[in-house]
Image (cartoon, rainbow, N blue to C red):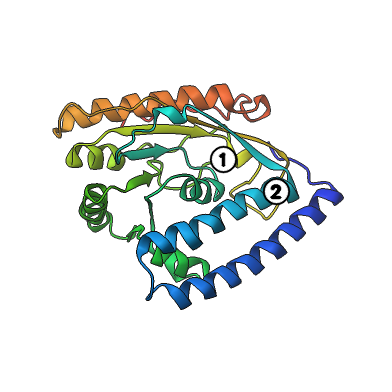
Amino acid sequence: MKKKLSFLQALRTSLFYLLLSCSVLIWGIVCLAVFLFIPYAWLMKGFIQPWCRFVVGLASVVVGVKYNITGLENLPKNACVIVSKHQSTWETIFYTGLIYPISNVLKRELQFIPFFGWMLALSRQVAINRGTPKEAFKQLLDKGSKLLKAGHYIVIFPEGTRTLPGQNGRFTRGGITLAATAGVEAVPVAHNAGEFWPKKGWAKFPGVINVVFGEPIKPQGSDAESIAQANKAAEAWIVTTMQKITSPIFLEKGNETTLSGS
């Protein structure tokens, strides 16, 4: 299902990108100028998190992309793995502005983008090389475990790439394996950001993104069977919740998908 962009909304979207580009340039330069001289916590709380909140607020005011959070009380006070639906760029920015300390699992190529990518590189993300799956999995467990021990929340998108609204990708076990290896809980999160901040194109559409945090899932062990069971539980919760929060126009016949069975 493809939404149509009105002329007024196109103007608002253009203004949004203009202001966003200016903010990336300004914040990027400031972060590069100060990161050698201030602690990591100051960099995150004083510069990177405020920028993320600015972008989320800018999207709300200029293009009407608002949000509603449900179940945030399910997020443990201690570090955990956040196993999230992935539809948009919005959720990565949103999580980083909402939670501290936090690290996202992302492809390392994103860190090479001028200014925006450089800010990512400064903020202790789990950058992996998706071109070499075995090495990427090792990087995930090594870097992720260290950051979890240091108290970081880790965000991972088990589908690996952004999906269209009403669709699901193959649900991999990396996030649950990381949680089992580190001995922490995994919290599934569902949202419908892709309806308003799509993965393709530049358009932004007004509406309310529903972000739902599920109850923590604790793998019973680090063996393959325990990981598979916990992974299926996380996937089932996300798929079921997505069917509840996704707009009916995106759940037309042919768009719905079933569990991957991974």
Residue drawn at the location 57% of the way across and 30% of the way down: 255
Q: Quadrant of the C terminus?
A: top left
Instruction: Using residue 29 as the reference point, say whether residue 137 is left or right of it.
Output: left
Identify residue type, mark 1: Leu
Image coordinates for residue 125, horizontal then vertical, percent = 36, 58
Amino acid, disc 2: Lys
Q: Nearer the viewer, residue 19 or 47?
A: 47
- Rendering coords of residue 71 (x, y %): 47, 26
The numbered disc on residue 90 is none
- 211 or 231, nearer to the observer: 211
Q: Where, by quadrant of the figure, is residue 18 drawn?
A: bottom right
Q: Position of residue 64 (x, y in %)?
A: 73, 43
Q: Which image quadrant for residue 250?
A: top right
Q: Is residue 109 visible?
A: no
Q: Residues within 10 Å of mark 2 (few under 14, many from 20)?
A: many
Q: Please, is residue 114 above or below residue 2 in the view?
A: below
How far apart are labels 1 and 2 at the CA level? 14 Å
Element marked by disc 1 = loop
x, y percentage for residue 207? 70, 36
Please tell me which of labels 1 and 2 falls first in the chain.
1
Location of mark 2 (residue)? 204
Report crowding for label 1: few under 14, some 14 to 19, many 20 or more residues within 10 A (C-alpha). Answer: many
Task: Give me the residue at 26% from left, 51% from top.
Answer: 144
Q: Quadrant of the N terminus?
A: top right
Residue that carries the numbered disc 1 in the rendered image: 164
Image quadrant in which you'd find residue 222:
top left
SS at circle 2: loop
Residue at image position (83%, 46%) is 6
Q: Going by the picture, which residue comes out furthest to the bottom?
A: 33
Whether residue 78 is visible here, answered yes or no, is yes
